Image (spheres, rainbow, N blue to C red):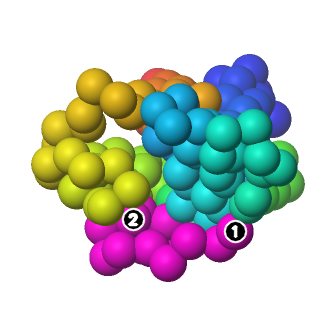
Amino acid sequence: MDKLTLISGTLFLVADIFAIVSLAMPDWIISDVGGDTRLGLMWTCLTLYNRPQVCFTPELQIEWLITLICIFVGCICITTTIILLVSSYWDRNVIPYARWVGFIALVLFCLAAVIFPMGFRVVEIGGQRYQLPNSHQVGLSYILFMLSLWITVMSELFAGKVCLPRF
């Protein structure tokens, strides 16, 4: 396995971990107005006026459901890419497949990044599409997801260098 394949695989692994952690945490949108509100794609947690925190699985609107599906399938694609890059140690012919599966993950993450802000219109937030009100802000989960997206872009660039013909 050459150096570029190793770098690409490592970056894909970091991106996958960040995306999975961002899904697991309920900190996509946060607010401290009237208590502590943490909205996520898989969990939502509320703390009202120093009462115990209540976490539950939210009923997602269509925009956030599509975002969740895109990120979940993107994580599966990144994991598949990592497996293909590791298997390229024995068979170099699988590298172009790894590159294409990684590209599909990149497209899915980009779709999720564009679709997610359309859901700011939910009752819990009270904003408009692509306009988060001043009382709410993006949280750590969203930042980790965006970081995962950028690391996936870098990973794909390294994977592209691996696929260049050698003269």
Of the residues under marks 2 and 1, which one precedes in the sequence?
Answer: 1
Image quadrant assignment for residue 60: bottom left
Could you tell me residue 3's position as x and y percent? 74, 21
Q: For the point 56% across and 71% down, which residue is it?
A: 58
Up-down relation of residue 57 to residue 7 (above or below): below
Q: For the point 68% across and 46% down, which residue is it?
A: 47
Up-down relation of residue 69 to residue 143 (above or below): below
Q: How many marks?
A: 2
Q: Amino acid at mark 1?
A: Phe
- From the viewer's perspective, is 6 left or right of 78? right
- From the viewer's perspective, is 89 left or right of 65? right
Q: Nearer the viewer, mark 2 or mark 1?
A: 1
Q: Counting other residues with Cα less than 10 Å from the Cα at mark 2, is it few (<14), some (14-19), or many (20 or more)?
A: many
Taking the magenta stretch, the answer to whether it contains residue 81 is no
Q: For the point 39% across and 56% down, which residue is it?
A: 124
Dominant SS type (magenta): helix
Could you tell me residue 122's position as x and y percent? 30, 61
Could you tell me residue 79's position as x and y percent? 71, 58
Q: Which residues are magenta?
A: 56-70
Residue labelled with disc 2: 64
In the rendered structure, find residue 56 and report the number of the disc placed on it: 1
